[in-house]
């Protein structure tokens, strides 16, 4: 009886071990630990110590998760070099520009979908290609220059306020800037009425 009992006990013990291994395998297969990625900035010498402490904390608090900590450097190669060519100011288009009179404090805001100097040249009577004098196109700016007896302005009197590829959005942004700054030469005329924004 004792011998049978001992033998049975050994078998039960063996069975339990087998079941434990089986359940452990099943649990491992059906309920995998959830992988959680934590991306943090690389902080130099303290990084390894921080990583150890974080692993310890997560292991106690979230044992069902497998925490993977990734440290990323904030100093990347792309931040050291500017690969994208900057478009020269005079060749930029789809923008809102500001004309500042060289003889008084009058300003004018306008928009153009063409190159800045092409539109600026129409205002001040200068060719964007040659820089020679050409006929002005009638505008608030050219009218104002008549007031100064055609004292020559140049392309440097124009600055870019913002760029926008969508024509409608460009008109909206022009109107908002005119509404905000009320340039003297715009005479309170904006591209898009802004009553909705009041
Ligand atoms: Zn002026």
Image (cartoon, rainbow, N blue to C red):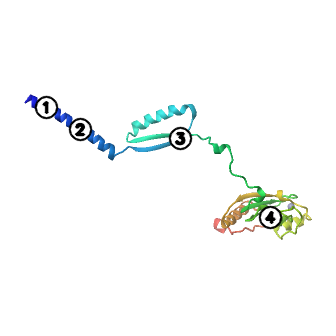
Comes first in the chain, label 2 or label 4:
2
The quarter holding residue 156 reads: bottom right
Q: Which residue corresponds to the image point at 89% horizontal and 63% vertical from the top-left?
A: 132
Label 3 element class: strand
Comes first in the chain, label 3 or label 4:
3
**Is mark 2 in CB contact (under 8 Å) with mark 4?**
no
Q: Which residue is mark 1?
A: 7
The quarter holding residue 197 reads: bottom right
In the image, ligand 1 is in what quadrant? Answer: bottom right
Q: Which residue is mark 2?
A: 18
* Ligand 1 within 8 Å, label 3 CB: no
Q: Nearer the viewer, mark 1 or mark 3?
A: 1
Q: Nearer the viewer, mark 2 or mark 4?
A: 2
Label 2 element class: helix
Q: Which residue corresponds to the image point at 33% horizontal and 45% vertical from the top-left?
A: 29
Q: Nearer the viewer, mark 4 or mark 1?
A: 1
Mark 3 burial class by Cα count in 10 Å: few <14, some 14-19, many 20+: some
Q: Identify which residue, 151 or 180, lies in the foreground.
A: 151
Q: Is residue 50 left or right of residue 168?
A: left
Q: Which residue is mark 3?
A: 40
Label 4 element class: helix
Q: Which residue is mark 4?
A: 118
């Amino acid at each position: 009886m004792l011998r049978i009992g001992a033998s049975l006990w050994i078998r039960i013990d063996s069975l339990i071990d087998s079941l434990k291994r089986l359940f452990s395998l099943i649990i491992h297969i059906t309920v995998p630990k959830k992988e959680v990625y934590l991306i943090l900035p690389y902080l130099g010498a303290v990084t390894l110590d921080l990583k150890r402490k974080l692993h310890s904390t997560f292991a106690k608090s979230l044992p069902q998760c497998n925490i993977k900590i990734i440290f990323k450097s904030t100093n990347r190669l792309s931040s050291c070099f500017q690969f994208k060519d900057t478009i020269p100011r005079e060749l930029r288009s789809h923008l809102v520009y500001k004309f500042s009179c060289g003889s008084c404090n009058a300003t004018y805001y306008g928009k153009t979908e063409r190159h800045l100097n092409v539109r600026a040249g129409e205002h001040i009577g200068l060719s964007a290609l040659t820089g020679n004098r050409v006929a002005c196109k009638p505008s608030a700016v050219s009218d104002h220059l008549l007031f100064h007896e055609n004292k020559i302005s140049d392309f440097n009197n124009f600055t870019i306020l913002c760029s926008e590829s969508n024509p409608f959005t460009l008109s909206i942004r022009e109107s908002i800037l005119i509404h905000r700054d009320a340039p003297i030469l715009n005479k309170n005329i904006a591209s898009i009425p802004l009553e909705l924004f009041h």
